[in-house]
Image (tube, helix red, strand yellow):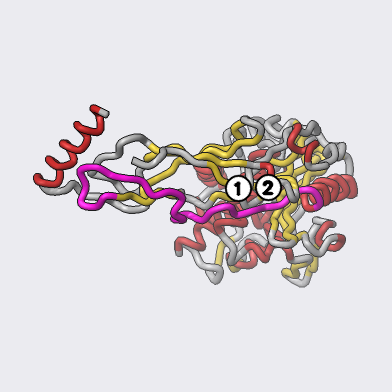
Amino acid sequence: MRPQSFRFTVLALFALFGTAFSLLAQAQMVPRAPQIDAKGYLLMDATSGQIIVERNADQRLPPASLTKMMTAYIAEAELQKGNISEKDMAPISVQAWQMGGSRMFVREGTRVPVGDLLRGIIIQSGNDASVAMAEYIAGSEDAFADLMNQHANRLGMDNSHFMNATGWPAENHFTTAKDMAILARAIVRDFPDHYDLYAKKEFTYNGITQQNRNLLLWRDPSVDGLKTGHTDEAGYCLVSSAKKDGMRLIAVVMGTDSEGARARESQKLLTYGFRFFETYKAYSAGDVLDTVDVWMGEQNQLRLGLAEDLVLTIPRESHESLKAEISVTPQLEAPIVEGQQYGSLTVRMNNDVLVKKPLVALEAVEEAGLFTKLWHHLMLFFKGLF
């Protein structure tokens, strides 16, 4: 049997938590993260899901209209499934029409295309549009809120609970900066055909043109979403996303003190992330990372690799000092199941484990016939003697 481990150079996963930074970051000349004036904030690499900077990211806070990201997410999911169509005409109830705060200005007793309601939610932050969408999808806003919580649970938003589709202040209605980043990442990943709506600067309905409240859409050409929020209790909030040189970042700030502050603090995070970090795809799913011997099988060797792409977020130009190690289950015997774990890939820096991924079989190996199995048993017997 060949050796069960070897070393080779790869990029490694790197994380910063809070405004502190690790020894690895210091070695690569990464400065301290900027001070952010917000109750909770987070910067995430959208591709790897790695958190670069965070503070109070798991603190439960009122989300205000950031809630509408989940409302839009569910609407986009229903559109993708074919359960509803953008051309469907959704009825406008008295409850939707009477909503205060930011509005799309739909009229009670009329019907509005679902596509227009979606734009009213995302671009205009319409409370009336959000309620109308919730009622059209689930029958009532209460039932829709239950659907929101089911989706939050599925996405791993462990510190979120929704009571309505708008973010209107309500007891037991809360989320976190981390959960909003998870949701933003899901929107970008799951519904690319609708994501361009989050970059639209204005939308006109019923003769009324309203501008998107995300100031970064005007200030930074790399920014293409996502959503603002504000109530007296929540303060000024913003979930933003930007893409530059193949890297997409998601910034979340919650509880700032003004519209200008939420844009300014978000810009600090995005600038820091783009300037000092990079996204690197180290391996693709299915790449052969090792070939090992198999006993009792119809074939004598097995190819091993990763089930998913390995995407790493690291300080720029830091990959030369990072190592990886492969460990394989000893003395593999057929049958081998495709996709089952038979080892691991461990990325290290100065003997510290940075990330560990399962190493899986890239193919199945069936059991050999009786003669081959007897021969292999004999070989293993003599191998054991020596």
Looking at the rendered image, the quarter that the N terminus falls into is top left
Label drawn at residue 22: none
* Nearer to us in this view, 370 or 281: 370
Where 252 sits versus 380, above or below? below
Query: Is residue 290 on the magenta stretch?
Result: yes
Residue 100 location, x and y as percent?
75, 49
Q: Is residue 175 left or right of residue 263?
A: left
Q: Residue at x 60, y 47 (%)?
A: 9
Residue nearest the observer in this picture, 205 or 12: 12
Whether residue 149 is visible here, answered yes or no, is: no
Dot 1 lies on which element?
A: loop
Q: Which residue is mark 1?
A: 10
The residue that disc 2 covers is 319
Cβ–Cβ below 8 Å for labels 1 and 2? yes
The span shown in magenta is 275-300
Tell me where residue 238 appears, x and y as whole percent. 77, 47
Which is nearer the eye, 134 or 21? Answer: 21
Taking the view exactly as shown, the residue that stands out farthest to the top is 385
Work out whether residue 74 or residue 104 is closer to the camera in this orientation and state it. Answer: 74
Q: Crowding near pointer 2: few (<14 within 10 Å), some, many (20+)?
A: some
Residue 243 vertical position relative to residue 330 in the rendered view, above or below: below
Residue 163 left/right relative to 213: left
Say whether residue 256 is left or right of residue 88: right
